[in-house]
């Protein structure tokens, strides 16, 4: 566990929630089981009508770190909800967290280690294990590493990105969030840019991005995913493996066969 007085960077986990009662407790318990505990968990709820907030409140009573819950006055959508959560964080590092995944115990410890070893790294992301709604294994996410262990500024292909549930970035990038409302998603013309695409783009321009080829998260695929991805056994486009899975764009970086 993290030691009191540890001089290393403080980590904020930011979780955007919306009707996540089915799986959120398992995710919360995986955060509490981290070998390197976060400094805080920020939960921004986008108008849940199920028991999501009751479950979070119950968890917060005995959580080994502070939990802040914010109820949005109006619906922001998942992208805006995550961007709002970032503004409320106070840590030196910020980790995006989906409400329905499961983190391996050494997730934050491994990610934090990379930041400690290289002050030029602005973002770290990692591999994941795709699982079904009962956490039965489907496949690895990246069949082959999508990039070198460290990509220096402006060296990645244009529009490369990673999904948010894999990402941790330095809080120095937070001020760039003021530009987000003006950004548009090149994968979905006319729509706002994804929170994860936005911070990956900013990080790749001003610093280095590091990749850990370890499955530090279980990404749960179920009928209610906002964005999902099917099994991928080699770097190629996604194939939906079950009715109801919603397949999002595959990061450009994964297409380097």
Image (spheres, rainbow, N blue to C red):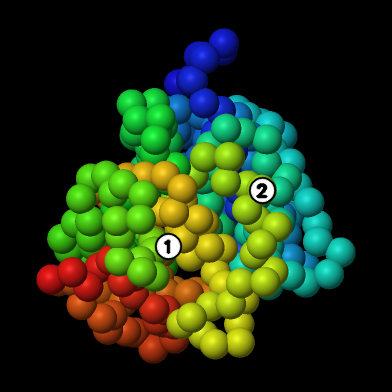
- Contact between labelled residues 2 and 1, with CB atoms less than 8 Å apart: no
Residue at figure coordinates x 72%, y 34% from the top left: 61
- Kind of element beneath mark 2: helix
> Which residue is denoted by mark 2 in the rendering?
175
Residue 215 coordinates in the image, percent (x, y): 28, 50
Q: Is residue 214 visible?
A: no
Q: Closer to the N terminus: mark 1 or mark 2?
A: 1
Q: CA distance from mark 1 to mark 2?
A: 21 Å
How many marks the image carries: the answer is 2
* Left or right of 37 in this view: 114: left
Where is the N terminus found, in terms of image quarters? top left
* Left or right of 35 in this view: 19: right
Where is the C terminus found, in terms of image quarters? bottom left
Residue 107 coordinates in the image, percent (x, y): 38, 39
Residue at figure coordinates x 26%, y 81% from the top left: 237
Farthest-out residue, top:
5
Q: Which of the pair 63/120 is nearer the observer?
A: 120
> Which residue is denoted by mark 1 in the rendering?
163
- Kind of element beneath mark 1: loop
**Vertical arrangement, residue 2 with respect to residue 203, above or below:** above
Q: Is residue 32 visible?
A: yes
Residue at figure coordinates x 77%, y 72% from the top left: 75
């Amino acid at each position: 566990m993290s030691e009191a007085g540890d001089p290393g960077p403080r980590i904020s986990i930011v979780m955007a929630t919306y009707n996540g009662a089915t799986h959120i407790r398992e995710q919360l318990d995986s955060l509490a089981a981290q070998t390197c505990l976060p400094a805080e968990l920020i939960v921004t709820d986008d108008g849940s009508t199920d028991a999501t907030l009751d479950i979070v409140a119950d968890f917060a009573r005995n959580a080994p770190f502070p939990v802040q819950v914010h109820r949005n006055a109006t619906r922001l959508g998942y992208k805006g909800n995550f961007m709002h959560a970032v503004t409320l964080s106070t840590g030196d590092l910020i980790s995006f967290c989906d409400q329905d995944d499961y983190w391996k115990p050494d997730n934050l410890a491994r990610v934090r280690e990379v930041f400690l070893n290289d002050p030029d790294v602005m973002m770290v992301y990692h591999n994941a294990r795709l699982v079904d709604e009962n956490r039965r294994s489907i496949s690895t996410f990246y069949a082959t590493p999508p990039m070198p262990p460290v990509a220096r500024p402006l060296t990645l292909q244009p529009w490369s990105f990673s999904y948010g549930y894999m990402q941790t970035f330095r809080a120095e990038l937070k001020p760039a969030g003021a530009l987000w409302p003006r950004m548009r998603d090149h994968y979905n013309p006319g729509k706002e840019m994804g929170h994860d695409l936005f911070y990956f783009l900013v990080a790749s321009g001003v610093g280095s991005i590091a990749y850990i080829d370890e499955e530090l998260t279980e990404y749960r695929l179920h009928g209610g995913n906002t964005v999902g991805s099917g099994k991928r056994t080699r770097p190629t486009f996604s194939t939906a493996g079950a009715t109801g899975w919603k397949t999002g764009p595959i990061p450009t970086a994964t297409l380097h066969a």
